[in-house]
Amino acid sequence: MTGIEANKNTGTKRSDDLAPHKWESRRLINWSSAWPWVSAMVLLLALPVVFPSGSAITIMNQMAITIIFALAYNMLLGQGGMLSFGHAVYMGLGGFFCMHVLNWVEYDGLWLPLPLLPVLGGLFGLAFAFIIGSFSTRRAGTVFAMISLGVGELIAACSIIIVVFFGGEEGVSGDRSMGPEVFGFDFAQQREVYYLIVAWLLISTLAMYLFSRTPIGRITNAVRDNEERAEFLGYSQRHVRWISFCASGFFCGVAGALFAVNLEILTEENLNTTQSGIILLVTFLGGVGFFVGPIIGAIVFTLLQTVLSLYTEIWQLYLGILFVLTVMFFPSGLTGLIAVHIAPWKAGKLGLLAVPYAKLIIPLLAFVLSGAAILEILFHAREASVGDEAMTLYGITFNSHSLLPMIVAVVVAAGSVVIMKRIMPSLKEAWDAASPVSNAP
């Protein structure tokens, strides 16, 4: 007797009769959701062909490592609501351990293919996350943040004292090419290292995404939003945070191992509070409420860091200003800024914003350039050596000690602000017209 015959009197069907249809729909959904991963893989494999220079590949290597680190950090901040001020510790510890493993391979004859090194780094980061998380995840919020800060400072201080493991101020260096060859590759070339990092980038990103879709990942979101309600449902908020903390520590260790492979040296700077602050900036800049937020933040931060540092000595000041502006006016980060345009785009009204944006972009660009000019003039006038009064900015050479350049920059900045204020009402009207929510009855 079939399920339909057994239930023909009630007009219902058994769940096993519908199972094939559910399985088919799920399979189609899985196939349709695979295209971003395939597209990302194709793009990553093609980048060295488009940008073949050694400096470009080095930047892309650092960018990929930062993405893994930022995604691992977002497992705490974005998914679990745990603000950590010392999460670089787990990346640094994994990297230092892997650097010692490289030296064991070179000097002690240890047989270990280089592509497996991130596994060891991840396990080492996991071990320390397991120990530290056993007491730090008992509480969330300010208590957790202060414990993470204290642990970070403690281990950063130990990196100077325990010379055997951390190498003191000089750090620990190694040679990645001394291990056994893998399919004829000894990883002496940066391009070979790039493909190794990309492989682990795809593996780690997919694993962290799948973790966020598991029941424990969903419960982590529940604990973040309302830990008391999660407790009433029977879930231990401490154990949930601990599991998420350990998973984050593992992928931080993977990022540390890849950093060791890429640069072949680690120092105290790789696990101090500054590095933890940088990854916090990267994650907030991209957007903690989105899985792709840390990816966008890592890409933008790495590009700004490498490009701005070539043209100005105060590039860190610009990054700090960008971070403050993002937190104040775009709390959802750059990804959130992009996401708000999805609804007008789906409604077919994104074109209504084209004219206001075109009017706004010129005064906005003038304000940014004039503001940067003010900072650069002040910095040069204060830090330049005696007699060095000439400076070149935007292709123009002038006297930085003269009032005229500063007056011009201030006038342009003020004028840009006035123009933008006049444009904002029309931009708001365009947003109201383009937003489906505002037009809803």
Image: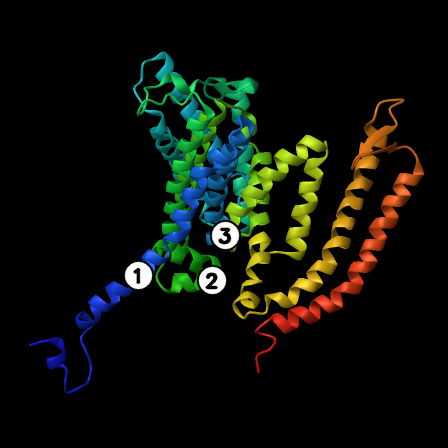
Residue pointed to by mark 3: 78
- Could you say where residue 343 lies in the image, as x and y percent from the top left? 54, 67
Task: Tell me whether circle 3 and circle 1 mark residues in contact (CB < 8 Å).
Answer: no
Spot the residue most to the front.
50
Q: Going by the image, does 292 lie left or right of 310?
A: left
Q: Along the line of sight, which residue is nearer the eye, 28 or 49? A: 49
Q: Along the line of sight, which residue is nearer the eye, 222 or 7? A: 7
- Could you say where residue 60 lies in the image, as x and y percent from the top left? 51, 35
Q: Along the line of sight, which residue is nearer the eye, 246 or 102? A: 102
Spot the residue most to the top.
107
| Residue found at x 43% / y 60% | 222
CA–CA distance between discs 2 and 1? 34 Å
What amino acid type should be assigned to the residue bearing mark 1? Leu
- How many dots with numbers? 3
- Could you say where residue 196 lies in the image, as x and y percent from the top left? 40, 31
| Front disc: 2 or 3 | 3
Q: Going by the image, does 204 lie left or right of 309?
A: left
Spot the residue most to the right.
403
Q: Secondary structure at mark 3?
A: helix
- Could you say where residue 159 lies in the image, as x and y percent from the top left? 52, 24
Label 2 or label 3, whichever comes before in sequence order: 3
Q: Secondary structure at mark 1?
A: helix
Residue pointed to by mark 2: 226
Which disc, if any, is residue 281? none
| Residue found at x 80% / y 40% | 373
| Front disc: 3 or 1 | 1
**Dot 1 surroundings within 10 Å: few (below 14), some, or many (20 or more)?**
few
Quadrant hosting residue 215: bottom left
